[in-house]
Image (spheres, helix red, strand yellow):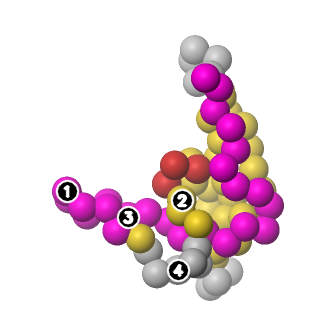
Amino acid sequence: MPATARYKLNDLVNKKRTSGVFTEIGPAVGKIIGMKEKFDKRKRPSYYCTVKWADGRTSEHAQHMLTPAP
């Protein structure tokens, strides 16, 4: 089953943080400003989101590391 994009442009998201055994949700909310499809060596697609955070930074994350913002 091929990967599909979970988010759309302008969706609000939080980033997951792993701290040892537990996974917690970061307090910062960001907006998705770009989507990119990358392929692994087996030619399977995965989606990466460019997120603009409230403090002005931008970063790129795999979609499995993001959760919808409440």
User: Among all residues in the image, which is located at the extreme bottom?
Assistant: 55
* CA separation in Å, label 4 and label 1: 21 Å
- Return the residue at label 1: 21
* CA separation in Å, label 2 and label 4: 11 Å
In the rendering, which numbered label is found on residue 28?
Answer: 4
Mark before the other along the chain sequence, 2 or 3: 3
In the image, which residues are magenta? 1-24
Q: Count neighbours of disc 3 (C-alpha within 10 A) and say few if under 14, some if 14 to 19, many if 20 or more.
A: few
- From the top left corner, tell me how far across and down residue 11 is, in percent: 72, 67
In the image, taking residue 1 as reference, residue 5 lies left or right, namely right
Task: Tell me whether the residue at label 2 lies in contact with that at label 3, contact meaning CB atoms closer than 8 angstroms.
Answer: no
* CA separation in Å, label 1 and label 3: 11 Å
- Return the residue at label 3: 17
- Three-letter code for the amino acid on which mark 2 is drawn: Leu
> Which structural element holds mark 4?
loop
Residue shown at the point (70%, 55%) measured from the top left: 7
Q: Count neighbours of disc 2 (C-alpha within 10 A) and say few if under 14, some if 14 to 19, many if 20 or more.
A: many
In the image, taking residue 37 as reference, residue 68 lies left or right, namely left
- Return the residue at label 2: 66
* Rendered-image quadrant of the N terminus: top right
* CA separation in Å, label 2 and label 3: 9 Å
> Which structural element holds mark 3?
strand
Residue shown at the point (78%, 68%) measured from the top left: 10
Mark before the other along the chain sequence, 2 or 4: 4
* Rendered-image quadrant of the C terminus: bottom right
